[in-house]
Amino acid sequence: MKYVKLGTTDLEVSKVCLGCMGFGDPENGMHTWTLNEEKSREIISYAIDEGINFFDTAIGYQNGTSEQYLGRTIKDYADREDMVVATKFLPRTEEEIKNNVSGQEHIRNMAQKSLENLGLDYIDLYIYHMWDFNTPITDILDGLNQLVDEGLVHNIGISNCFAWQLVKSNAIAKENGLKGFVSVQGHHNLIFREEEREMIPYCLEDDIATTPYSSLASGRLSRLPSVTSKRLEEDSYAKTKYDKTEEQDNKIIYRVNELAEKYDVTMTEVSLSWLETKVTSPIVGSTKKYHVDGAVGSTELNLSKDDIGYLEELYVPHELVGVMADNNKTLNDNSKVWMKHTKDKL
């Protein structure tokens, strides 16, 4: 496994990050295809054995059970100080807003619950999961910095934002002597490259770490279009989010397969190796051990300049989907993805 520095922090993280959205009680959240604790522990411990030390979860993944499974596995299989754990907090709910729960109070409550779920004393990277137009960014930054000052959180990151939102946030943090966001987690892969317009150039300029999700486009970039998966069969969002560009996307996927055959590697390795030329550490979901093998193997594959050009040649612009499509202050909160799928008990 290769390791890289996470932006301006002192953290050394594996070149791939294990995404934990596939772990958690399948009867306790928005997904039915997630792994129970026994199977989750098998994948997490295997990833640790293979050199992965960077893990990304969220309080919203299966109502906190993903955090619980990850924390218990790390406790049993690894030295805490060798692991880098990232988790994410959700925006304030309508009920919290009506009850005058401040952004600072909300963040503290979320962090304390995540620490309880994880069974850890601190969070290495605490991530603002999605932009909350109902809570001032000054309150968000203040709440996060309070946790940093207390040692409960070591670094802060952001996810699902536009470049202007990240720039604005870090400018406000700098003006007020606060710690800014050191990483950004956006939707980025070979068939969804909108992050390369503004976000990636900005992050390279300011040394902000990029840890994209959906690195394999919900598995599309790891198999031929004729092959399906349990997730694509049961997750309506994952199944439909590339519908409008499917024909053009498939042409790129076939090129991934060509290069995989050329180098005698998997499509996963080709797709991730391409992405690793653009970002710090892509987040890769794994529900089987061979998924981990593909992620680890990708760090050893060096695509040529011609290979990269061949893969990129057919790209067409994509509309924003999911949480980023919801990143709009004119939308009613109840229509947003996170509101529709998150239970009140969080």
Image (cartoon, helix red, strand yellow):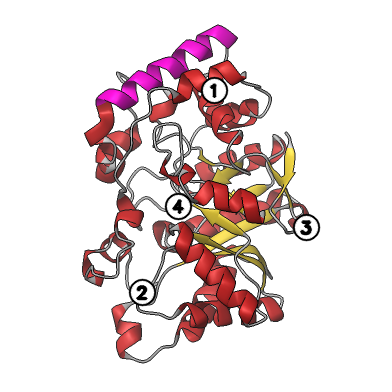
Magenta span: predominant SS is helix
Q: Nearer the viewer, mark 2 or mark 1?
A: 1
**Residue in the image at 62% along x and 69% along y:** 180
Q: Nearer the viewer, mark 4 or mark 2?
A: 2
Q: Is residue 257 magenta?
A: yes
* Helix, strand or loop at mark 1: helix
CA–CA distance in space, label 2 to label 3: 31 Å
Q: Is residue 162 left or right of residue 184?
A: left
**Residue in the image at 31% along x and 52% along y:** 322
Q: Is residue 104 above or below residue 156?
A: below
Q: Is residue 321 left or right of residue 183?
A: left
Residue hosting label 3? 10
CA–CA distance in space, label 3 to label 4: 30 Å
Instruction: Name which of mark 4 and mark 2 comes first in the sequence.
Output: 4
Q: Are marks 2 and 3 in contact (CB under 8 Å)?
A: no
CA–CA distance in space, label 3 to label 1: 30 Å
